[in-house]
Image (cartoon, grey):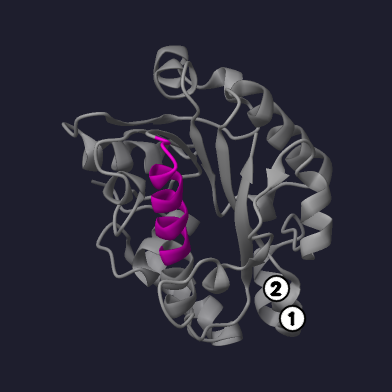
Amino acid sequence: MTEPETPSTARMIDYWLGGSDHHPVDVAAARAFESAYGPCADIFRSLRAFSGRAVRHLAAEGIDRFLVFGAGIPTRGNVHEQAPGARVLYTDIDPLIVAAGAAIVAGMDGVGYVRGDATDLAAIDPAARAEVLDGAPAGLVFLGLAAFLDDATLARALDAMYDAVPPGSRLAFDFDATELEAYPQALAMMGPAFHMRAPERFARLLGRWTLTGDGIVPVARWRPDGDPERVPDAFWGGVAVK
């Protein structure tokens, strides 16, 4: 297989999570970012732990079908491992990541991976989409994407998700807070299309979605299993209900 020439955020996260589905170009990019910001592995492990807690919470409330946006590499505690027996559809916009992800979940009962854009639900394979969205309430997992969408696009995407799911469905979400502003060199690496948000700003973009009583909090402090991880409050998140 030809080595990729450009780094992928999904593969960089896989590196930080201790996975094996990344390449030297991804490691180099991850280390360059850390040189301007600091170690990232604990932050992304905390974010993955939040994803696991949110998915387990949804499963405990009876959700057994999940649509995952911007799924990246589906290893290291991803949705199908946190909700055993649930039907899970992973999606990503990057065809190379989709190919890698599809190979990982191939043969797993009830787990699939297709190309999909969180801002264009209608373009996701209709048959695959129907298996997780039609009928009973579904769980939407929207993690790691908000920073790459401007306010208008994000609001439209979240509104379309609301329309696409039955009542009782849940949305697990996160977003990049303004913590990165203290690291201008690292922030410059993210480029001009990178969007950080204060919690109250993100809350307005949820539109018709109703936050649970947990509200929007740093992800390490969302229903922690014990003492919250001691990591920077780089990511905030929560769960909302239709």
Q: Quadrant for the C terminus, please.
A: top right
Percent position (x, y) of residue 120?
A: 63, 26
Pick the residue in front: 6 or 114. Answer: 114
The numbered mark at residue 121 is none
Residue 177 lies, with reference to residue 38, above or below; the image says above
Q: Is residue 79 shown above or below 8?
A: above
- Asked whether disc 2 touches disc 1, contact meaning CB atoms under 8 Å apart, the reply is yes
For the point 42% across and 77% down, the residue is: 41
Three-letter code, disc 2: Leu
The answer to whether residue 175 is left or right of residue 184 is: left
Q: Is residue 154 left or right of residue 225?
A: right
Amino acid type, residue under disc 1 in the picture:
Pro
Quarter holding residue 131: top left
Q: Main secondary structure of the magenta part?
A: helix
Left/right of residue 106 with respect to residue 206 in the rendered view:
left
Is residue 6 in sight in this rendering?
no
Q: Nearer the viewer, residue 188 or 238?
A: 238
Residue hosting label 1: 184
Give the residue at mark 2: 187
Q: Position of residue 68 (x, y in %)?
A: 46, 39
Instruction: Tell me if residue 222 is in the magenta stretch.
Output: no
Magenta residues (range):
49-63
